[in-house]
Image (tube, rainbow, N blue to C red):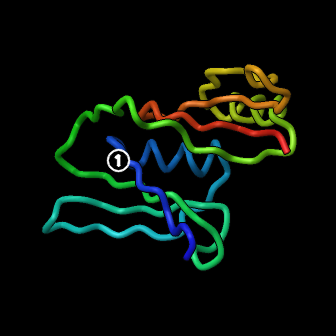
């Protein structure tokens, strides 16, 4: 067994695709509209779906707002340098909500950014 993808519901698909591709550097792997169901699925990631886990962005055409819920945590990405990644993300228009620094009660260097829908993405320095 292996993890295939994580699904996030997004309000504005184009805005979310711009964040995950232009700001975080992922690639749009595939996109499919389902007119009868009034939704679109878009899969993004750093590599092929056959090789790596990816994100599924689900856009329900008639939904204008989602509650993220108290149980959701974050997506984690490994980066070589968290401070440099934060600088690049800011330069690309992304929102850094916790600058790079050691995690509380530990020494691992982490940072957090937020996508257009408010989902947190943790950057963990290699």
Please give the count of numbered marks on the rendered protein: 1
For this view, does 74 lie left or right of residue 34?
right
Give the quadrant of the N terminus.
Answer: bottom right
Q: Position of residue 32 (x, y in %)?
A: 35, 70
Image location of residue 23, percent across then percent down: 64, 42
Q: Residue at x 81, y 24 (%)?
A: 102
| Residue reaching furthest to the left | 36
Residue in the foreground of this view, choosing between 25 and 66: 66
Q: Quadrant of the C terminus?
A: top right
- Residue 30 coordinates in the image, percent (x, y): 47, 70
Which quarter of the picture shows residue 63?
A: top left
Left or right: residue 60 compared with residue 122: left
Determine the residue positioned at 24% across, 51% down: 60
Q: Is residue 80 above or below residue 102?
A: below
> Residue 5's spot in the image, x, y percent?
49, 63
Q: Which residue is at 46% across, 44% downward?
A: 16
Whether 55 is drawn above or below 36: the answer is above
Give the SS element for disc 1. strand
Quarter of the figure with residue 38 = bottom left
Q: Is residue 56 left or right of residue 78?
A: left
Residue 77 in the figure: left or right of residue 71: right
Residue holding disc 1 = 9
Camera-side residue of 17 and 110: 110
- Determine crowd level at label 1: few under 14, some 14-19, many 20+ residues with C-alpha closer than 10 A: some
- At a point 78% along the width and 29% down the height, the residue shown is 87
């Amino acid at each position: 067994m292996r993890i295939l993808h994580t699904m996030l519901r997004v309000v504005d698909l184009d805005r979310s695709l711009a964040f995950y591709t232009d700001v975080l550097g992922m690639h749009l792997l595939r996109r499919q509209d389902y007119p009868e169901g009034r939704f679109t699925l878009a899969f993004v990631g750093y590599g092929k779906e056959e090789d790596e886990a990816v994100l599924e962005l689900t856009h329900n055409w008639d939904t204008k707002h989602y509650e993220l819920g108290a149980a959701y945590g974050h997506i984690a990405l490994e980066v070589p340098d968290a401070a440099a990644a934060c600088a690049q993300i800011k330069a690309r228009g992304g929102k850094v909500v916790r600058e790079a620094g050691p995690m509380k009660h530990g020494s691992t260097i982490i940072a957090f950014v937020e996508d257009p829908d408010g989902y947190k993405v943790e950057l963990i320095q290699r």
